[in-house]
Amino acid sequence: MRVADAIVKALEKEGVEVAFGIPGGAIMEVYDALYDSNIRHILARHEQGAVHMADGYARASGRVGIAFATSGPGATNTVTGIATAYMDSSPIIVFTGQVPRAMIGNDAFQEADITGITMPITKHNYLVTDEREILKIVKEAFHIASTGRPGPVLIDLPKDVTQAEIDFDYPERVEIRGYKPKIQGHPKQIKRAVELIMKSERPIILAGGGVRISNAHPEVLELAEKIPAFVVTTLMGKGAIPEEHPLCLGFIGMHGTKYGNLAVMDADLIIAVGCRFSDRTVGRFDEFAPNAKIIHIDIDPAEIGKNVRVDVPIVGDAKHVLREMIKLIEFKARKEWFDHVNELRRKYPLRYEFKEGVVKPQYVVEKVYEMFPDAIVTTEVGQNQMWAAQYFKVKYPRQFITSGGLGTMGFGFPAAIGAKVANPDKVVIDIAGDGSFLMNIQELATAVDYGINVVVCILNNAYLGMVRQWQELFYDKRYSATRLRYPEMSFEKIAKGFGAHGITVEKPSEVEDALKEAVEVDKPVVIDFHVEVEENVFPFVPPGRSLREVLG
Amino acid sequence: MKKFIAVLVENRPGVLARVSSLFRRRGFNIESLSVGTTERNDISRMTIVVDEDERTVEQVVKQLNKLIEVIKVSDVTDNSVHRELALVKVNAPPDKRGEIVEIANIFRARIVDVARDSFIVEITGDEEKINAFIDLMRQYGIKEVARTGVVSMARGSKVTSI
Ligand SMILES: Cc1ncc(C[n+]2csc(CCOP(=O)(O)OP(=O)(O)O)c2C)c(N)n1
Ligand SMILES: [Mg+2]
């Protein structure tokens, strides 16, 4: 069998239903094989878009996302998408074409050393030099991408390899001696953690993206209720617990809730589950939760002790570890602490000022939440992302999809397309910025072409708003290169030009109707909300400061 | 704090690049790195010497372990044999030859090449010994030095193998 056909057959065996990509000379054999396959291929309009789609699909479904690109520029265009998936531990496999083996290293037409380029941003990558290894490599790629701490895997396919003939003998099992993720936590460490919890008077659970990955949300909730403990999340952890639950204090960090941040600083115990204590979450490392002992549960041993000191490390899968912990925990009322935190919550709610006749960006997100609480929400990056995170209260895991680690503008829209492909019956909304949306706007063509009806809500502030906010607060209002809009520009017209539907909203009274219209038309929709231009995101913990030094 | 780390890796092209890419990206300083085959032809062994604080060394070990092609990482700093080989090309005018040979003998080094006005001296030992020897050779004028980097192996029954 031709290697290209064998690859596609292997993907079918792995249960792949959809793939995203753009063909080109070096990967034409694979595309030729896809022609006869049941795998649905979505032709993106830029390889970065294709990879974000695969990533969005993976995050929304929990399955491995697949992307294809040709050699050279096709491959290099995938880089931002791969780095985005890497930082947020998203399982994708990217297949790239490569020049024929004999030409590698000769600077042949459209040759790029993509395995060299992506070495630091993939969990693992392969340059296939022997066609007899391809099936083993594909099998390994699925295993590596989706187990342990998931991440992107890239397989670089020289054209003559894809043309070669092999027997289709797809391995049933994988055995990689250098890769054995640890699932069960150490019983002694679990016991020590439970002792700390029982002693604690002011416990807080900090849930990260690892909770979603390990499907540990039922366990987080059970643990929280059994201790009982409040739960804060990281940005990536949103959805680890329903955010309207009385024990949930929202997400913490730079733009997290003030009550969540302050509660963490007052806690005497942090039970961190599947998070990596990034600077955006903990502020100043050495002043994070100064009076607290820290229990850190993570499947990646390298995350433990990387950024903050840890008292009880537990390496293992969050779901397994939490289950063991729950068995040993006994309920203990902590009234004083609960009163204190509830008081913080009452004193420092999320808020913004209403202004007559002006569309506030927060208001748009509030309306989106009110009207579509079950929608999958993706975000771009910047102020829009933070308002989405603050005002959209996530109900279930995999509902909120955002580029947390890399902060990639242009992620949200293609990710929404991927999420919609995984969940065709759900409303999928990209909360966007005007700057970010322009970075992958070409995917409107993809959405229209395949009838993938996502809704883009642009919080159009005519600025690279988050950068402008920093300029306002830290650079004496010197708005260097952050102004975006000019009068002739119309997202509505652009959308219509692509064959999508476009709506412009300039008054608060129009917001609700526009959203209603958006889910009624049978097309992808772009709503251009002209929002308050110089609105700032608060609360705001300035970079490098402790979570106590929160502005707003 | 100087640490000696033995790393067993898959004997495949690209593995060395992965390891050095990791050190560069994470900002770990490599003092020396040597790599060669082992008792098994599918496994190579690296000895990496780093001079970092304890926390960084811990990260080095953990990050190495995350590489798929890394099979085993062990700290072989203490209670181990550390050896390095150096070739030193030194000026050897007729009136100094005797002296140089004498010093070489004391260090159990060997003269492996004799030219009209220079020697190549081969010396093995731990780093300090080699440094000391090179320092002594400076007075004659060193033309070039090539060092292999350290290889280390734990003494006694402790083994780094699979
Ligand atoms: C690809 C990329 N380039 C640059 C940045 C830096 N950056 C962070 S937020 C931001 C502004 C985003 O503007 P917009 O999408 O309009 O969102 P807003 O903050 O106005 O809501 C920029 C330029 C980034 N995160 N990603
Ligand atoms: Mg903007």
Image: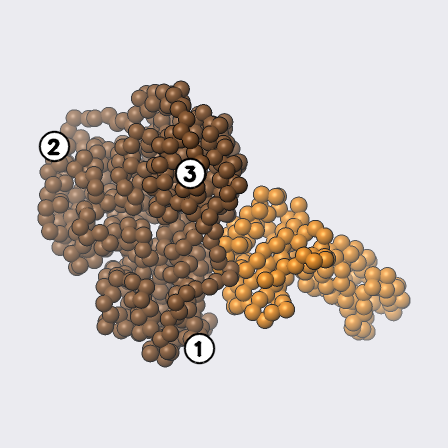
**In the figure, A100 relative to A221: above or below?**
below
Residue matched to label 3: A327
The answer to whether residue A283 is seen in the rendering is no
Q: Mark 2 Cα within 10 Å, few/some/many (few <14, many 20+)?
A: few
Tell me if label 3 and label 2 are in contact, CB under 8 Å: no
Q: Colour of chain A?
A: brown
Are the residues flagged by discs 3 and 2 from a single subunit?
yes
x and y, in percent, of residue A131 in the image: 41, 75
Residue A16 location, quadrant: bottom left
User: Which is nearer the N-term, disc 1 or disc 2?
Assistant: 1
**Which quadrant holds residue A158?**
bottom left
- The letter of the orange chain is B
- Sequence order check, earlier mark of 3 and 2: 3
Mark 1 lies on residue: A102
Side of A249 where A116 appears, left or right: right
Disc number for residue A232: none
Q: Position of residue A517 (x, y in %)?
A: 10, 43
Label 3: few (<14), some (14–19) or many (≥20) C-alpha neighbours in 10 Å: few
Q: What type is the residue that disc 1 sits on? A: Ala
Secondary structure under the numbered disc 3 in the rendered image: helix
Q: In this view, does A78 lie to the left or right of A423?
A: right
